[in-house]
Structures are given as structure tokens and as C-alpha cells.
Image (tube, coloured by chain):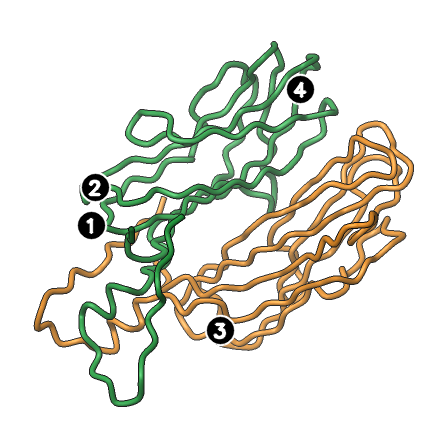
Amino acid sequence: MATRTQPTWFLGYDITDTDLNGLPGGAIAHNEVVASQASITTSVALTGYSLTITPPASRILKISFCIFTTIGTLTTNDSMTIALQKDGSQIDAWAVSHHVASGGATCRGFALDINPTNASHTYALFGSRGIGTATYGTGSAFIFIVPGFILIEDVGPSF
Amino acid sequence: MRVASAPLFTDGQPVAVSDLMDLPGGLIAYANVTTNMTGITTIAPLTGFSLTFTPQPRRILRISIRIHVSKTAASSSDAWVTQLVKDGIPADTWHTLYGYTGVPESTTVQTLDINPTSVSHTYTVQGGSIGSTGTYASNYAGTVIGRFTIEDIGPMFV
């Protein structure tokens, strides 16, 4: 467990750069994805779910996403893996199962990157078959619109 | 419905303490969980999902939970329940249906705590089976970890 004591301000207090740096920076990168992707079996980059940023030093980043995933023929005990890579290395992963043939399942998740270096970093989502033999996809499989997104927020100083 | 006007600053405007307090405070507590549990049946505390802190007065907190759980013993009409507990009292509940036995699935949920008192609070997460006799286990390994975060997302408004 890690906790941070928030500053206590009072009337007449002289605001400093430290106070401002103690606040979150908010959304710093995002992308909405409307393209569909098919034939996902082995690990493949999910089109549109990639962001490259240079964060300030000593910060915490929150990476959030939402993807509508699809399956072709249902297989027993299927599972699709959504992996988050940072600069080519996996830093987190999620699993989503489908219970209806040719159906869809929403996968949403978030991760933290504590104190990334003040250099260019690329965060990207990859999709793959986890358990089973099914073939997967992303995006709209039906008549309604299901855009996905990836979002990076500066949620404050590292602690 | 509650709607607030976000502050907009103008060039040359002196920044006051009240301006800062109108802004979100950001992440104030988090836990990364790697300890696995097995044999979870009835609702019980999930190891590692506990945060204790004292929020500033008149704030709104966003609490996010990510777990990675599988059903290890089949049971019909069964559901996994994720429950947020604040100071020993259940505060929010989510249900997840697990269709396959032995297949981990990720569940991500969020809730708000609006205007908590500015005293020490302990937030925990518990989980288990409801509606039948299923048995569950958490499946953290490698980079797949549980997460429990609390963010100050701004001042309370009415």
C-alpha cells in the first residue's frame, strides 16, 4: 500500500511550483478507435491502440482502455488476452472470455506506470488467443457503434 | 444530476488557494496485489486490497478495482461478487458471471465516494460466491497484478 498526504492550504498561503507540481496533469494522450480488426490468434498489435509520449519526471501515469472484442466459432474454455506493452515489453495483461458464438465481450482495464523516465515511451495494446482455439477480433461486429479508446492520464506526482 | 463548472484561468490572473482547491488532487493511494488466494467460496476479504488514508474535506474520490479471478469448481447459476467495503461496511457491489471453469477473467470496476469525512478511512475489497456453491481463486502472475486505486477527482459540488 502506498498513500500520499495531500497539502493543506490556507487563506494567504503563498502558492509555489511545488504546490502546482503536486496536482495531476490530467489527460496527456488518447485515441479513439473505430476500426475493426479480425483474425487475431497469435499476439498482434491492436490497430489504433498505441500512444507515444514523453512524461514529466517523477509522475504516475494511469493507462486506461476499453475494447469491444469478438469471437468467431465458440470454443470450450476460450479466453482472449489483451496485453499492455511499454516500449516492447509487457507490463500488464487482461483476460476476457466469450460465452456466445460470434458474439462480443467488452474488455476494459487500467494500469499504473509509477515514475516512468522522462524520455519517450510507447504504450501499446496487443491482442492474442489466450486459452482455447478460437479466432478473435475487435471493434463493431453488429449494427451499433462501439468505439474503443486508450487514454493516458498524469494522475499526480510519484510516491 | 450534479454539474459543476470547471475553472478557466486567464492570463495575468492571480492564482488563489481556492483555485487550487477547485482542481483534482490526483492519485492519493494505491496498492498493487500479487498475492494469490485459493478456495474462495463465501464473500471474504481479498488479501492486499486495503487502503487507509485521510482525505481532505469536501472532496470526491474515485475508487478503481481490478481483479483477475477464475472459477475452480463448477456450479450452476453462480456469480462472483466483488464488494467495496468502507470502514467495515459494504459500500458498493458488482457481479461477474464466469462461464468456464479454470479460465481466469479480468474484472475492472469503479465507484465514487462523495464528500467523505476528513478522518482516517479504510477501504477494502472482498469477493466470493453468491447464489450457489462455486469456488474461486485469484490468478496473479508475472505482470498480471491486482490493482486498487483511489483518486481525488475534485471538490464536492451540489
Residue type at numbered disc 3: Pro
Rendered image: mark on residue B117: 2
Q: Residue at x 82, y 58 (%)?
A: A36
Rendered image: mark on residue B57: 1
- Farthest residue toward the top? B133
Q: Residue B4 location in percent, x, y?
A: 35, 60
Instruction: Give the label, 4 or 1, closer to the camera.
Output: 1
Please report contact status of discs 2 and 1: CB closer than 8 Å, yes or no. yes
Residue type at numbered disc 1: Pro
Q: Residue A31 location in percent, x, y?
A: 64, 67
- Residue beneath label 4, please? B72
Label 2 lies in what chain? B
Q: Nearer the viewer, residue A141 or B25?
A: A141
What is the distance, in whole Å, between disc 2 and disc 1 at their CAs?
6 Å
| Lower position in the chain sequence, tag 2 or tag 4 | 4
Q: Nearer the viewer, residue A28 or B19?
A: B19
What is the distance, in whole Å, between disc 2 and disc 4 at their CAs?
40 Å
Instruction: Give the label, 3 or 1, closer to the camera.
Output: 1
Label 1 lies in what chain? B
Q: Secondary structure at mark 3?
A: loop
- Farthest residue toward the left? A12
Q: Are marks 2 and 4 on the same chain?
A: yes
Q: Are marks 4 and 1 on the same chain?
A: yes
Q: Residue at x 15, y 64 (%)?
A: A9
- Residue beneath label 3, please? A55
Label 4 lies in what chain? B
Pointer 3: residues within 10 angstroms few (<14), some, or many (20+)?
some
What is the distance, in whole Å, between disc 3 and disc 2 at their CAs?
34 Å
Task: Spot the green chain and give its letter.
Answer: B
Q: Quadrant of residue B113?
A: top left
| Lower position in the chain sequence, tag 2 or tag 1 | 1
Q: Secondary structure at mark 4?
A: strand
